[in-house]
Image (tube, rainbow, N blue to C red):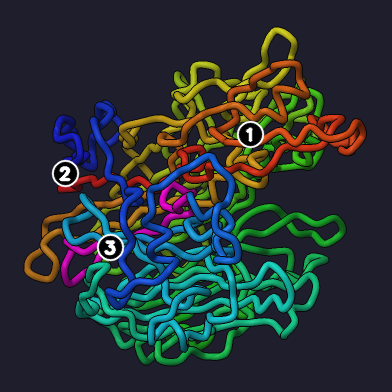
Amino acid sequence: MRFVREASLVAVTVLTAASLTHVAAEAVPTSDYAVTDDGAYTRHDGGTDQAIAHCGDPRSDPAADNVANDGDTDSNDGGNRRQGNEPTVAIDPTNPNVIVSGWNDYCQTDLAAGWMGLGFSTDRGATWSNSTLPGYPLDNSTEGSVSPLKGRTDSGDPLVAFDNDGRLFVGGIAFNRTKPQLGSVFVSTYGRRPGPAGVSGQLPKDYLRTRIVGKVGTPGVAGIFQDKPMLEVDRTEGPHSDNVYFCWTKFQGSGRNKIYFSRSTDHGRSFSRGVIVSDGFVQGCDIAVEGDGDVYVSWRTFAANGTGREDGMDVVRSDDGGATFDNKPTQIAKFTPYFPNVRGLRNCGDGLFFCGPEGYVFHRVPLEPRLTADQTGKLGGVFATWNAVDPASVEPRTTSYSSATPSTVGRSLVYVAKSTNNGRAWSPGVPVDRAMTDPGHQYFSDIDAYDGVLVAVWQDNRTDDAYSIQRPIGNMLDAQGRAVATGTDAVATYAATSTDGSTWQPLGQVSAATHQSQYEMFGSRDTPFQGDYNWVAIADGNGTAAPGGLFAYLTWTDNRQVEPGEDPRETEAEAGFVDGFDVEQCRVDLAGREGDVNRGVPLARADAPYTGDNCGNGGGLDQDIFGQRLTLN
């Protein structure tokens, strides 16, 4: 079996089950595929509106807003160079040329909305048409106007999956950032055929409907929120074929979080009432369907004093198509979570996000375990992946930063465990790429299985020559002990393959470029964010015509096109200090009176603040989704 990065066409590795551990890693590919290409947007029905036009608008002007009361906070700036993160991906089993990706899309930020982006490719992920899920605030289309998501300003946490007939299902969350919250989880359905053609283009799938699967009261109760959903479809040929399975976390505070599960047996027209499948102190579910149709739901567990609970991953199984589940979950693994933080703070930057004396800058790295199974049945069992601290790497911390326990740091590795007896027992977690001679932190792992092959992907900072277990990713200390960026060679995407889930062949770096993941492009340009996950999907490139054309497509969040810059608020407060984490921004100094700003806020000035950023579309927020294709045989 050989594995080729198709974008490069220069690297080939021959693999057999007996030689998986002896094959050298491939060369770095020469190019990737831009899933979000900073281009025009296509509305689901081919029409257009203010939001669609804005998301495809490349304009950038440092002048302040020049049109009052138009609903656009910066009318002379477009929206198509804004952030995108948390990508998903799925391949149409009836036509593998069609690939769909989803992501959190910030192109409507100036329009007071944040909405799920969707990308459609008809050439196996080489080129993409960007769109957005119907129902956003300015959607005046016939279908969008009656969407149950109307009345909400934000949607995200995108999920995509196909059924055997080429129907596309899109899941996510939707909510308001102010009352009434209307926090909901939903599943939308796109039909097998192309959508209507119009002035903004045509999509290869036709939007049909959206169904709310779980919601809280109105107004939303404080502390209760529906979040972190997952979606899977039964693509076996068994009695539960085409069932749509959906799970999510209901956050209720005080350790009372629960995992809920729902299913549709009529192609997404209706969903069952959500049922609780977990105990408490949990979050972040995933779903896998085995070749015999058994359904597995997993989640992250948290240690809690006095409860006997441990940090780890649990699972339950259903053998009747999701109608009922095990009464008691089985533990897949227990581990020490990789938790980058300073004194418990996991999002660090400037201003209100300032953490500790060094001024480290880093985004959160939540632990999101994943689950998969080979629905073709060629590779039996269920497979789980997670990233956690390598116990052998733990050492006392030497600065304010910790990542293992409050007083220690450790290296994060990606692990995989498997069960071959219906989830009753699990093998110990195996590192997929220990990389002892070139260490880095591994995180945001995902895994997929199809036709006897497993592919695992993750983010990795081994490319950073300034890597240290004692510091956050992308950070180093200058001569004065202040945190500064290590440059753009900080993070890349890596992958590994297996034919049994126990022995893994590292493929090395599968992204053509590295990037700096800690750019402060969120909040008020004062904190980084990379989302919570990346994704991989495997399919037969020959579709239903004939077997043997296996390939994988992976997507990840990428900052390579972000324009770095300086934050005048920081450089003035710090006597010209530039830490390398800031992005391009355009601000006007209001030069007010002494004392107009609270000096208790780190990096705050004594006089009045600057204006907001007037060139949000100038490249400082140009976080994108990139993809790569791997040929598997």
Residue behind mark 3:
120
Residue 33 in view in this figure: yes
Residue drawn 64% across the image and 54% down it:
312
Q: Residues within 10 Å of mark 3 (few under 14, many from 20)?
A: many
- Residue at 67% from the left image edge and 12% from the top image edge: 478
Q: Which residue is mark 1?
A: 391
Q: Quadrant of residue 167?
A: bottom left
**Among the two numbered marks 2 and 1 on one chain, the one whose residue lies closer to the N terminus:** 2
Which quadrant of the figure contains the N terminus? top left
Magenta range: 77-99
Q: Which residue is outermost to the top? A: 479
Under circle 3, the secondary element is strand
Q: Is residue 131 left or right of residue 429?
A: left
Q: Tell me which corner region of the image, top left, top right, bottom left or bottom right, holds residue 72.
A: bottom right
**Distance (Cα) linking label 2 and label 3:** 29 Å
**Residue at coordinates 57% horizontally, 68% vertically from top-left?**
154
Taking the image as shown, residue 191 lies to the left or right of residue 522, namely left
Q: Are the residues flagged by discs 3 and 1 in contact, CB closer than 8 Å?
A: no
Picture coordinates of residue 432, whole percent (x, y): 42, 39
Of the residues tagged 3 and 1, which is closer to the observer? 3
In primary-sequence order, the first of circles 3 and 1 is: 3
Q: Is residue 491 magenta?
A: no
Q: Is residue 15 left or right of residue 370?
A: left
Which tag, 2 or 3, sits closer to the chain's start? 2
Residue 622 drawn above or below residue 87: above
